[in-house]
Image (cartoon, helix red, strand yellow):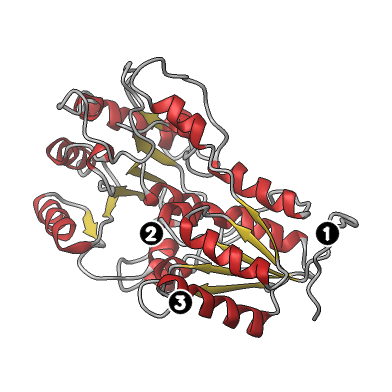
Amino acid sequence: MAKNNADISVNSGTARYKNVLVARFSALGDVAMTIPVVYSVCRANPTTRFVMITQPVASTLFINAPSNLVVLGIDTKVKYHGIAGLLKLKNELISTYDIDAFVDLHDVLRSWILAFFLRLAGVKSKRLDKGRSGKRALTRKHNKRMLPLISSRARYREVFYRMGFSFEESFVSIYGTEKAPEDIFADITPPKHSNEKWIAIAPFAKHQGKIYPLEMMEKVVAELSKWENVHIFLLGAGEHEGKVLRKWADSYPNITTLADKRHGFPKELALLSHCDVMLSMDSANMHIASLVKLPVVSVWGATHPYCGFMGWHQDERNAVQLNMACRPCSVFGNKPCMNHDYFCLKGISPQLIITHLRNALRKSSIL
């Protein structure tokens, strides 16, 4: 198929491109945020094939994908490492999928180099606008511009629009309007009772500026474990997180930890689709829960929903945060606390979080 280097021609809301490459390599939460947009554009453009490339573990998030979406887990650490690896990747993608357009949802050096190689082969490309200047103004120490920025989801959607794809956001859940079959997670827990409430808790994040103090989170867990007809599922990964969650599960009743083994996203997402609410940090788990339409009570410290990373269709009233002049100090929570005390997190009482959880359940007509 000859590559089309002409300007985009839109007819009935569909671009002329037939094989569109889409890239978002990391982080996990950002990849999860692409799914509602990617699924929606795929379903609105059934005659176009979309090829999504991402990190291997993130590729398993794309459950029940549209038939015209191909998802590839790309190993950029070994097989496709460096400039030579990206050139090899470009050649393989064009040879196998006849790529004629590239939508870069990452906007980092790796995707810039890949876009350069693709343009040399006659492939049109459009790149994400991350809004870096707005984020700097929002997180600077002095003279903050405290205005909500465009959400990451809207930024993803905008790249497809510029590429010529017109679509409505039709995504509801990776399971549509239903929940996942219970047999998928049968080895984790028995089926849910009709009067039972399931609460998922994901207490960890990548950076300290986003993690509610564990000794305070344990108080939340201890209180919730006393609630009648409640079962708690703890989410985490790795040796350290596994030890913490195992201790909590052994210390309090009605708790199951999912950190003892790697169940995989297909199984964990199926279980989450049956939960009633999740408690998480500003982390990937908030975005993963959003894929199954699970309400999330989220705890925010160094970061802020104004940065554009609120979970898809999550209610900002469920965001637990303190109004402080220094917040937000970071887009990703990776900067040391300028006051050396992380009061933005330590100042949030366990009871405040519990109240938000209770209210979230009431809004769902569960209590």
The vertical placement of 54 against 276, above or below, is: below
The vertical placement of 9 against 135, above or below, is: below
Residue 118 relative to residue 168: left or right: left
Q: Which residue is mark 1?
A: 14
What residue is at 41 percent from the left and 37 percent from the top? 361
Pick out the residue farthest to the right.
11
The vertical placement of 121 against 302, above or below, is: below
Q: Mark 1 or mark 2, which has the lower sequence index?
A: 1
**Residue 9: x and y, percent?**
87, 57
Quarter in which the N terminus is drawn: bottom right
Asked whether 287 or 350 is in front, the reply is 287
**Residue 205: x and y, percent?**
28, 47
Asked whether 45 or 268 is in front, the reply is 45
Classify 10 Å Cα crowding around label 1: few (below 14), some (14-19), many (20 and above): many
What residue is at 46 percent from the left and 76 percent from the top? 84
Q: Which mark's residue is nearer the viewer, 1 or 2?
A: 1
**Residue 243: x and y, percent?**
12, 58
Whether residue 296 is visible, yes or no, is yes
Question: What amino acid is found at the position of numbered circle 2 in the picture?
Answer: Lys
Quadrant hosting residue 264: bottom left
Q: Which residue is mark 2?
A: 192
C-alpha separation, residue under disc 3 versus residue under disc 1: 33 Å
Classify 10 Å Cα crowding around label 3: few (below 14), some (14-19), many (20 and above): some
Residue 167 relative to residue 248: left or right: right
> What SS does tag 3 mark?
helix
Q: Mark 3 or mark 2, which has the lower sequence index?
A: 3
> What SS does tag 2 mark?
loop
Q: Which residue is mark 3?
A: 85
**Residue 132: x and y, percent?**
49, 37
